[in-house]
Every structure is written in C-alpha cells, then in structure tokens.
Image (spheres, rainbow, N blue to C red):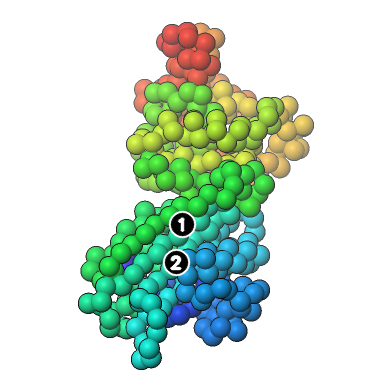
Amino acid sequence: MDGLVHCIHASRTAAALVLTGGRTGAIPLLLRRPGGSRTVLDVAVPYGPAAVANYLGEAPAQACSPETAQLMARRAFGRAVELRPDASFPVVGLGATAALATDRVRRGEDRLHVAAFDGSRTVALELQFSTRHANRQAQESAAERVIVGLLADAVGVAPWREPAGSGLASVSRRVLIDADELAVVHDGTQPWVTAYPDGRRRPGGQIPTALVPGSFNPWHAAHQALLEAARRRFGDPVAYELSITNVDKPPLPTVEALRRAAQFRGRAGLVLTAAPTFVEKARLLPGTAFVVGADTARRIVDPVYYGGVEAMHGALRELRSVGSKFVVAGRLEHGRFLQLRDLTMPSEFAGLFEAIPAGELRVDVSSTELRAGRPASG
C-alpha cells in the first residue's frame, strides 16, 4: 500500500476527499509519506447527520448510499477546483460513506460506497462485507485499501482492483458519464487528460519526462522512432501529446480526438491538451522535454510565429525558466535533409536545443504524405 501511495504522490493530480461513517484511516495512509501535501488539497470528515447535510447543502435521503457517495464526490471536486494552486493542476474529488460493524442494532448489511468524480465521469463502487468479516477493525482496514485504490485509479496511477483478502462479499463498479469527456479540457476545468495504453483515460497523471507532440493523423513509424529516442535520453514515462485546439484550425471534435487516441492503445501513453503552443504546453507540464523534427524546431525560433523578435525571446525565456528543452531530429524536406545545425538560432537560447544525430534517427515520413497516399520519402 505504501508503494501505491508513493505513486499517487508522484502524480500531478490533486484531490479533495470527504469521508463519513468510518474508514478515516485512509487519511494517515495518504499523509504519512512525504509528498502528501502535493496530492491532498482538502479532507472533510462530516460524521454526524447535521454535518453531512451541511457539507452537501441538504440532508441526503440516506446517509450510506451510492447516491450520497456520488454527491460527496461532486462536492469534493468543487472544493478541489477552488483550492488547487492554479488551473494547471488536474483535480479529482472522492467521496465515501460506510455502514460498518457497530455495537448497536442496524438494518442492512455492512457496506461501503465510494465514488470519484473528475468533472465529466464518476467511478462508483458499491461494496458489501462478508458476514465472516464482521470485525470493525478488519472492515476499516479493507475500506482504507479500497479508498486508496480508487484514488489511485482516479489519478491514473493504476486501475482499481479489489484488494486481496478484503473480506468483501460483493463488489459492483459503475462508470457514469455526465458530459463530453474532453469538454473539461476545452473549458479549462482539467488542464489535460492522459490516455493510457490499456485504454483508460484520466485527468492529469504523472508529468512525462518527455513528449512527442503531433497531430497523429495518422500515427506512423517516425513518431515511434521519436518516442524511442526520448526514452533513451530521459527514461520513462515518455508519451505522445495531441492538442485538441490549434492556432490555425477549428478545435478537434471529441470523436476525432478519441479516434486518433485509439491508435496508441497498447503502444504508449497520449496526453491530450488544449495547448496549441509550446509555451502553453510547458506551463501545464513544467520540466518536460519535447522531441520534435527540425521543421518544427525551425518554427520555434522564427519570430514570424510570435509577432516579433522580442515576443519570441520572451517565450523562449519562459520555456527555459520552467525547465523545458527541445530534442531535435533531422527531417527530409523537399529533397534536403534539414538538421538543427542548419537553423538560425539565437545564441542566448542554443542550450534549449539538442540534436539527435542523423545516424541515430532521421524523419523521412510525414502524416501528410500518408494521408495523400504517397509513398514515404527517403
């Protein structure tokens, strides 16, 4: 469990939690390791009925129910949005309510309801304890592991799995979609979404060491080669990046963005942003390196794309200040092999760029050629 908590804290995604009816042991599990303050924005434990009603803004029909856990998760998500340092931090809300073993007569089975909400989807768990596990301490321990496991799923660390030996008689998992899942990226509620190789899509996650940006229409072998070059230099996690907005084109419809994202299933992670420029990408993902072709690097140091030399210098200084850098592969262009050394580079910013030797990698194919049905160049 400590290893899972460590991975949660390594994620950029922050959370607000609200827990009632027991199982507050999840809080020390999350906070006893260094880095807890990066993940946990707020924790509420409204234990009595009046406190629960005050937190939700109304008394729930039933204190321990799927509906109450989901309402709590939504309220916690709102708290997370209010409390995050700035809009570059992805957030989730988690709510949990339980009816665990007690010293009084109570109708119904011992049970636990947990939900996580990210602005567009709710993952809801309904769990019932076995009669063989009527011990309160054992139930609390199992509930803590379930809550931490669902939080790990919500922030993209690992898919939720029933903890071994949890004593649960039954487990039900539902995913409820409220809205277009990329609308939260378009409107800025979530700064980015990560599509994982196993098909999961979650807001935020761990910031990749390096990204290969592109439109991926379609993805091709040169993109894969760029990703491998990134991995050799920076180690995992590396990923691709697709912006659903473009400076010169209409925003990508969600159905099209997800079609392109599907190309990476089983291959690599994909970060979906609404950041068309490298400065905007770097603000969301500080410290990330970008692996690009020489044609893209040429645009990065062309004042025309910034409206002037001073604006370009300001943008490059900001990129340097957040720890970004560019790794540049040579590119065959109109019969000429263009490399980093062929570009006109302001000396102040030469350290932002690193060349990939032509003997290691050269980009001789483009998505445009593939769409046109032309054979790859080279």
Q: Position of residue 21 (x, y in %)?
A: 45, 80
Which is nearer the eye, 182 or 180? 180
Residue at 38 percent across and 91 percent down: it is 104
Q: Position of residue 245 (x, y in %)?
A: 64, 35
Residue at 57 percent across and 73 percent down: it is 60
Question: Relative to 125, does residue 333 appear above or below in the rendering?
Answer: above
Report the residue marked by disc 2. Answer: 114
Which is nearer the eye, 74 or 184? 74
Q: Which mark is residue 215?
A: none
Left or right, 256 with respect to 83, comes to left
Would residue 366 be visible to someone looking at this image? yes
Considering the numbered disc 2 on the image, is that residue within a helix, a strand or a loop? strand
Residue at 52 percent across and 80 percent down: it is 45
Q: Residues within 10 Å of mark 1 (few under 14, many from 20)?
A: many
Q: Position of residue 327 (x, y in %)?
A: 49, 34
Instruction: Name the kind of residue labelled 1 in the image.
Output: Val
Q: Residue furthest front?
A: 107
